[in-house]
Image (cartoon, rainbow, N blue to C red):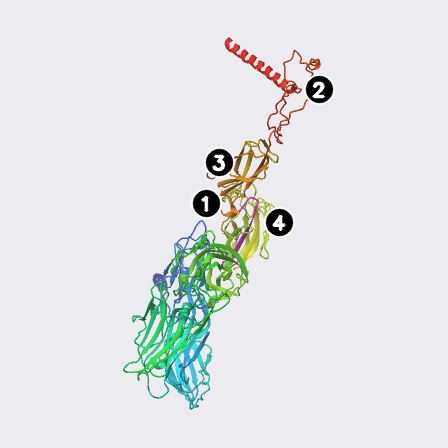
Amino acid sequence: MSSPHPLYPPSRVPRTIASLITVLAMLAAVFVLTAPARAATANYTVDIVGPNNASVRAYEAFSYGVTLSIPTARALEPIEGVELTATLDPDLTFDAVPTDGASPVASTRTNGNTVTFVLKPVTQNLSEFRFTVTQSKNLDRLSASSVFTTSIVGNSPGDLTAPDAQKVKTGVTGTQKFVPTKTASTVRGSDNRTVTYNFKVSDTTGNDRTNFFAYGVTFTDVLPAGSTVVDYSRNGELGGEWKFATGTDGSTTATYRAETVQDPQVNSNAARVWLAINYPSEHFNTGSRPPVNTVSLDLADAAGNRMPTATTTAQGEVLRDPQPKSTTSWAGAGTLVNGAVNQSVSFAGSFVNPSGDGDQLSTLTMESSSRTSAQDADAWNHLQFLSGDIGVSSNLIGLKLPMRFYYQTEKNADWTLLDSSSAWDTSTVANVSVWVDANGNPIGANPIRVADGDRVTGWRIQVLGTAAHDIPQDSQLSFNKVVRPAFANVVDGTTPAAGTAGGPYQEQVTTSGITVSGETLSSQAASAVTIVDALPVSTDIIAPATLPVGSTASYRANIANWDSGARSFDDSVLNLVLPVGVSYDAATGVTPVTETEIITGRKIPRPGDGLTVSTSAVTDADGVHQVVHFTFDTLSSFSVTGQPTLPYARWMWQYDVPVKVLPQAYQYAGTRASASTWAYTNDPAYRSLASTYGVTTASDRFAFQSELPKIATATGTSNVIAAGGLILAKQVRTATGEWGTSGTTRAGQSSTWQLSGVNALSGPVTDAVLFDRLPQAQDGRGSDFSLTLDSAVEGLPTGASVQYSPDATTASNGTWSDDFHGATAFRVRFGDIPEATLFTLQYSTLTPTNASVSWDKKSINVATVAGIYRGTTQSFDTNPATVVADPSPALSVRKLTNGDHFESAPGAPVRPGDTVRFTYTVTNTGDIALDSLALHDEWSAGDGSTGTLIPTSNESGPLAPGASREFEASSTAITGQYHNRVEAVGVAIGRSGKPLPADQQPAAATDQSWYIAQVPVVITPTPDPSTSPDPSSSPDPSSSPDPSSSPGPSAGPSPSGDSSTGPGLPTAPGTGGGLALTGAGPGGALIGLSGIIALLLGGAIVYGLRRRRGMN
């Protein structure tokens, strides 16, 4: 049986195997050397996420979230050099990223549509941040099908290996809320059979910009059988053209399609898409109106998503018999509102000649001037000319006839031709606009250049025939004059009677023409305009594009008074309502953007100089909003008397308002945080005037002004972003103050603290514990005095618990209980804090009454939350919040009268006419220096007179705490009971030497005193005959003096009639003072004897001492 395999000799098998092994080894070496290198495994990750709902509104800014995970990162071994590069969608632009506080981002670099985030040294294994972008490029390409694609990738510093790039897709939402607008007009004075229809596209979203750009704008208009197309627009600004098709029923379908993209924010009025249709008498009866004409609008967005068809209608005037050859003038009538914008008065002038004689015009002129009459001058003084839209009938446009615009000014009665260098070529008839260029008004093309201090007071439009073409019949000029209505006369400031409307103001227009045959035609008409008074106060707000949680930002709040009559409004208010969680930074304060007004050069009010800034709070469905109030002493008008001024934002009083973005603002993450301004006046003369200022007014939903349902307002929105982390914030306030990171306190006063936080991480923080050790004197945190809890902690989230301790220094030591009394620390066990969860705790502390609490002493508080995030223990701190002891200024005064202090009447005994000396000791018993010490001592005397003493001192200047100062005064004693009361006052001053606010000044100190001024009464006693000494008898031996004793004065009446000084002056209560009594008696003898003995004894002692010295 044969084998299928060949047989090798045994001696060759080992050799063959060896060869095979050698070949395999060589092949292995080749493969090892030539195999492609294998990519290293990434050892960290980076992720990117878009808005929470995966889509954003068209045109609005939004944010991306970035999460970086580096397992090897440690606080003691930070990883440096990490950079993350985001490649933005081509239609996006980088806006901002937080770089302070807890943000891991140090700085950024941009290059085209890429942005590189340079990170701080990474100390945690997980870091997060958000950055914002704006939709600022290729906006015309946005559609309901748009998707923004953004990616991010890291670098490979040190031992790190970068992961693959990560992408996120974000959709776009928007609207297509457009409607057609259609008007029907006829030539004034004609038979109304030729009707011109004008078509526009209008954006119905107003200030809430949501419409995508419009593509393929198409008007479709079905004209009735029997009507004829006389003329139509060609190459309008929409860039389309008309096409016509005749139906089987004789009707004509006119279709206009524009390929040019229509910006929803651009008014298409100037596009002048129109049709001129004639309704002949053989098909349309005189006395009837042409049929109602309906137009439909169709359009799509950039991706071809079509809007549902929208329609509107228009109808011509009543058809009438032909009129004689003539010019016709027409002027509008109506009611306008003081100071409002976008208000106008319309005029028209036409030429008709249905006679068939073929006579046409060589010139057609329409004009108005304030110099025509006093009535016209009054109208021009209440209707300030700002700009005008010139319209011409369609039959003139095709002829390309020359057209001129002339004007007069108050200071120049000559008709001045509009500068031929204007954008409009005045050699050709056109629908154009002219603008008054005065006082820096923002203008369009064709400026009417007026010197400062002057104003336009007349206008004239003129069309000229040429050798090729005369001006045909049914030609018409129109002028829509845009004005600023002024309730007060702009020249002399006079106003109509209270409660009445001004006017009617009549401006005459004259239309004239010269026919080819030489005939002059002319007609006049006058407008009739009334003006109601209103408050022309407007406001605007510029919100920051981004509000970074845990950081700062700034709003710009604006207000203006556009009163055309240059009236000012006292006590006017601008309120800025901030989003929930956004707090005014009072320490930085409000600042005006410019020092002076651009137009007038007047100084703009500043805080403390014509402007008072304060705060309060309002509540709505979002929560509690802080309100920053601007109260102006006077809100001056921007209008210069007699000069036109257009409302323009940069002319307004503009103020930058610094804010702090707290964790509560995170509730807006993924949406827009809205702030608003509201303006009104409390001037009694004007506060009841309606604020009818167009679209800038809205319902006063916060009830700022009780008398009006609507006031001026504006709104701005911002995108809220967070740096990532558990963002904590601490604020403090006194019972009546506003929240802030610093508050004031006094000894024995209670302060309220608010501790808020939000989990801005992309997952829950578990086993979270908050620990708050209250400030303790010399605790190493910079505190000068200690605080204790004065309330329980309120606002605990569901499932959280709180405990209190009088001695804990960490969350894990000390003794703990449920009793907050006397506690110096507390801890809150949250359990888990889910992603995007917000919490707000509140509690009160008590400031001690000991000596450690004095001016400028402070207590600083920081709280900490520790928890586990993605398997790692993390710690998050609040910002420091501080209470600072307010100064406690105080003084006392002590008053002495003739060196003694008295508590009640009668006081010091004095003699009438004596000089009474008063001394006063003023002591600074507070903790801050007192300056400008002054004393006023009001007195009343026994004779009914009153007055005031002004004590003086030899010292001056500030009196330091604890120091005293002497004052003196004197007066002449007045008979009777005298009482005076001194009042001492001083001015507490800070270290700068400036006085403290009025509410921090010390109370006056008082003291009082009395004196009694009486004439001493001298009593001469009458001798008793029964005891009178008998001159003839000897003295009674019983009353004779002892021969051994020293002689002394007699105790009995002197035979000579000398008497003692009687009862004398009373002795003051509580003192041993008073005038000494004189007289003789046993007391006097003893005193005299004692004196002699003391004198002898003293002499003996002196003599003995001298003998001893002599002996020595």
Tell me if label 3 and label 1 are in contact, CB under 8 Å. Answer: no
Q: Nearer the viewer, mark 4 or mark 2?
A: 2
* Residue farthest to the front, as pictured: 1032
Residue 576, horizontal then vertical, whole percent: 48, 59
The local secondary structure at tag 4 comes to loop
CA separation, marks 3 and 1? 23 Å
What type is the residue that disc 4 sits on?
Asp
Local crowd size for mark 2, using a 10 Å CA cut-off: few (<14), some (14–19), many (≥20): few
Circle nearer the N terminus (2, 1): 1
The answer to which of marks 4 and 3 sits earlier in the sequence is 4
Q: Which mark is residue 818?
A: 4
614 lies left or right of 404: right
Instruction: Check the image and report above or below for 783 versus 1091.
Output: below
| In-front residue for pair 513/962 | 513
- Residue drawn where x is 40% and y is 76% of the image: 347
* SS for callout 3: loop
The amino acid marked with disc number 1 is: Lys
Name which residue type carries label 3: Ser
The type of residue carrying mark 2 is Thr
**In the rendered image of this protein, does residue 397 appear above or below residue 1082?**
below
The residue stretch that appears in magenta: 745-764
Q: Are marks 4 and 3 in contact (CB under 8 Å)?
A: no
Q: Residue furthest left?
A: 467
- Residue under circle 1? 994
Q: Which residue is mark 2?
A: 1027
Contact (Cβ within 8 Å) of mark 4 with mark 1:
no
Instruction: Give the mark, 4 or 1, whose residue is nearer the N terminus.
Output: 4
Instruction: First in sequence, mark 3 or 1: give its number.
Output: 3
Circle 4 or circle 1, nearest the eye? 1
The CA distance from mark 2 to mark 1 is 81 Å
Q: Residue under circle 3?
A: 953
